[in-house]
Image (spheres, rainbow, N blue to C red):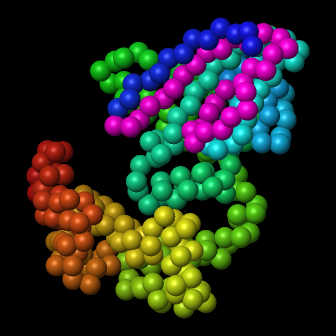
């Protein structure tokens, strides 16, 4: 294999890292040997062309094409006809997405391929966002970690919003479970239990709990608790309601129980968290 390589690794900050590489491949060579990894990889063809194999799918990508290699996809590339120059970005989506219930759900859908991003993209705006992220990496600025994560989020969210689709197999297989999640989203501030939800959707409780945790990585109780805690935080920051009222409106049976679970989850009591937020933002209570 005959190629020149320039590689820059983004700063590592709190487990966040964007890796960038630039390659020049010569004709009639195996450019990228078969491999797979847990990161998402994005390849932009600057000049020439590459023949890309993604699992069993083979595509030819020419200059201006962005190739998306999802996590855990076996991939390789060859230069069969002409030389090729390309840039590569890779990052772990576990470090781009946070730990809110919505981001956990998106992460799971992307990693288990129930939501897939098109593997070949020729959109000029997507290419522009790719170049913005690529160019900001490796600058070693004081704000470098923020810049890298910010540009990565803009780039990745654009791809998801404009070039993603639900895998039809998962959509069909989980259509009933989608209804379960929708029911929880609409009723988590009310008095609902795992047993009630399982019965409503004709599940055996034990099977329901196993299935729920497999899909969301949380038990039904943990899922509902997370939604209630997030809702209480929104009420604390956007209203003048008392903590007692916030507990009730967030689905907790009593303020002492709310306070206990809030502190276990967030690390502060509700009163401490609310005061810290208002002081941090210079808001009078």
| Place of residue 59 in the rendered image (x, y in percent of width and height, measured from the top left) | 84, 32
Residue found at x 79% / y 30%: 52
Tell me what residue is drawn at x 63 percent, y 55 percent. 112
Q: In this view, does 80 lie to the left or right of 166?
A: right
**Residue 4 horizontal/vertical position (percent):** 65, 8
Give the extent of the magenta segment: 14-43
Q: Which residue is drawn at 74% across and 20% down?
A: 31
Whether residue 8 sits left or right of residue 243 in the image: it is right
In the image shown, does 204 or 154 lie closer to the viewer?
A: 204
Relative to 9, does residue 271 appear above or below in the rendering?
Answer: below
* In the image, residue 103 above or below residue 31: below
Determine whether 226 is above or below 60 in the image: below
Q: Is residue 138 rendered magenta in the image?
A: no
Q: Where is residue 99 in the image (x, y as percent from the top left)?
A: 40, 54
**Which image quadrant is residue 201 in?**
bottom right
> Does the segment drawn in magenta span residue 37?
yes
| Figure quadrant of the C terminus | bottom left
As rendered, which of 35 and 27 lies closer to the eye?
Answer: 35
- The residue positioned 57% from the left and 39% from the top of the image is 39
Q: Where is residue 156 in the image (x, y as percent from the top left)?
A: 56, 38
Q: Name the main secondary structure of what is drawn in magenta.
A: strand
């Amino acid at each position: 294999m005959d190629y020149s390589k320039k590689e820059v690794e983004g700063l590592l900050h709190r487990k966040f890292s964007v890796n960038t590489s630039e390659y020049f491949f010569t004709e009639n060579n195996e450019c990228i040997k078969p491999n797979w990894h847990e990161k998402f990889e994005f390849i932009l063809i600057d000049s020439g062309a590459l023949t890309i194999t993604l699992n069993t799918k083979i595509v030819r990508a020419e200059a201006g094409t962005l190739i998306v290699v999802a996590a855990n996809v076996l991939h390789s590339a060859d230069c069969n006809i002409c030389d090729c120059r390309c840039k590569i970005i890779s990052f772990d989506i576990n470090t781009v997405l946070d730990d809110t219930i919505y981001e956990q759900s998106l992460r799971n859908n992307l990693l288990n391929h129930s939501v897939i991003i098109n593997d070949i993209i020729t959109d000029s705006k997507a290419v522009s966002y790719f170049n913005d992220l690529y160019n900001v990496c490796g600058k070693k600025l004081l704000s470098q970690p923020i810049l890298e994560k910010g540009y990565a989020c803009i780039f990745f969210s654009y791809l998801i919003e404009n070039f993603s689709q639900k895998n039809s197999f998962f959509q069909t297989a989980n259509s009933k479970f989608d209804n379960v999640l929708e029911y929880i989203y609409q009723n988590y501030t009310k008095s609902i239990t795992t047993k009630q939800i399982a019965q409503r959707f004709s599940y055996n409780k034990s099977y329901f709990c196993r299935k729920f945790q497999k899909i969301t990585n949380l038990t039904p109780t943990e899922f509902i608790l997370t939604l209630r805690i997030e809702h209480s935080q929104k009420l604390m920051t956007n209203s003048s309601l008392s903590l007692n009222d916030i507990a009730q409106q967030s689905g907790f049976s009593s303020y002492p129980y709310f306070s206990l679970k809030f502190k276990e989850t967030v690390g502060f009591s509700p009163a401490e968290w609310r005061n810290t937020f208002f002081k941090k933002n210079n808001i009078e209570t």
